[in-house]
Image (cartoon, rainbow, N blue to C red):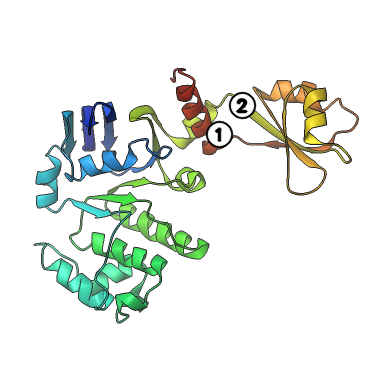
Amino acid sequence: MTTMAIECQGLTKRYGPQPALRDVTLAIPEGRKVAILGPNGAGKTTFISLWLGLLHPTSGTCSIRGQSPDAAIRQGWVGAVLQETVLPILVTASELLTHVGRFYPHRLSADECLALAGIPELASRRVDQLSSGQRRRVAFAMALVGQPRLLFLDEPTESMDLDARDGFWRQVSEWAEEEGRTVCFSTHNLAEAERHADDVAVLHRGTLVAFDTPERLTRGVSVAHMRFTAHGESAAALQDRLGVTIRALANSGRFEAVGEDLDTLLRSVVPDPACSEFDLLQETLEDAFRELVGLREQGGTTA
């Protein structure tokens, strides 16, 4: 029988008359990497705070491996890197991790945590000498001290450069896959979610509007994109003539056509003598996200 890392049933949180999270039901099996997506104010931080026991629901239930969040944390099952993590600055990374480890009965050494986080070279560096991206990596190492089964990451790669992001996700994947651990992370970087998540939960106005794999969400997109060259043309003129949405790209003479489906684009754009050098674009998780949120904005429904 599959063990559930997280189960929510009718989870609702109100701060006033308007719910920040409403009637969310969700089950995440152990061993999955799950991205929590949504525009600002969608309820992502509230969602994660309820999972971490930092908030308590107005109604509904939330459990971690069959236990309440508070009980799961007491047993050392949960690690977290929050968006507003503040580290003491007048200690080295190694000293910080050694101190945090004293709170856990089954702890890793500072050197083990730094190695798992991919930053062993920072052991003797004082925190105030680290860049903001390096501090995020130290916070990740700190979340691993108690050998958790479940890791929550709130905007984990914020302030990291591209190389640091790649290194961070490589370490997260290796850590998670070693013993089938679970990772839940929020991000505004949709390409990052598409690349690293097994499942995606989309929140909008406190409601869970979709929960599925990136591939299935992408296949459900009802828009198509095609890029083409049309020298001497403007986006406005092309849009009027072709009858589909046209966006001008940064490189002169290149445009992107957006339509409900590929057949519409082919019939509208390809026959025009001014258009050439066509490239069909694969739908992305960003397309799916925009469509899901757009449907909600318009009062539509989702599958």
Q: Which residue is mark 2?
A: 223
Residue 12: where, in percent of width, then height? 23, 28
Apparent side of residue 156 relative to residue 253 in the rendered image (left or right)? left
Amino acid on which the number 2 mark rests in the picture: Val
Viewer-closest of 295 and 9: 295
Residue 10 shows in the view: yes
Which quadrant of the rendered structure holds the C terminus? Answer: top left
**Circles 1 and 2: CB atoms closer than 8 Å:** yes
Residue 267: where, in percent of width, then height? 78, 21
Amino acid on which the number 1 mark rests in the picture: Asp
Which quadrant of the rendered structure holds the N terminus? Answer: top left
Helix, strand or loop under label 1: helix
Helix, strand or loop under label 2: loop
Residue 275: where, in percent of width, then height? 85, 33
Between the residue at mark 1 and the residue at mark 2, the CA separation in whole angstroms equals 8 Å
Residue that appears at 20% across and 54% down: 148
Residue at the extreme front of the image, as rendered: 16
Residue that appears at 51% across and 26% down: 294
Q: Residues within 10 Å of mark 1 (few under 14, many from 20)?
A: some
Q: Quadrant of residue 172?
A: bottom left
Viewer-closest of 128 and 93: 128
Residue 75: where, in percent of width, then height? 10, 51
Residue that appears at 76% across and 21% down: 243
Residue 180 shows in the view: no
Apparent side of residue 138 relative to residue 221 in the rendered image (left or right)? left
Residue that appears at 33% across and 76% down: 128
Q: Residues within 10 Å of mark 2 (few under 14, many from 20)?
A: some
Mark number displayed over residue 287: 1
Viewer-closest of 82 and 288: 82
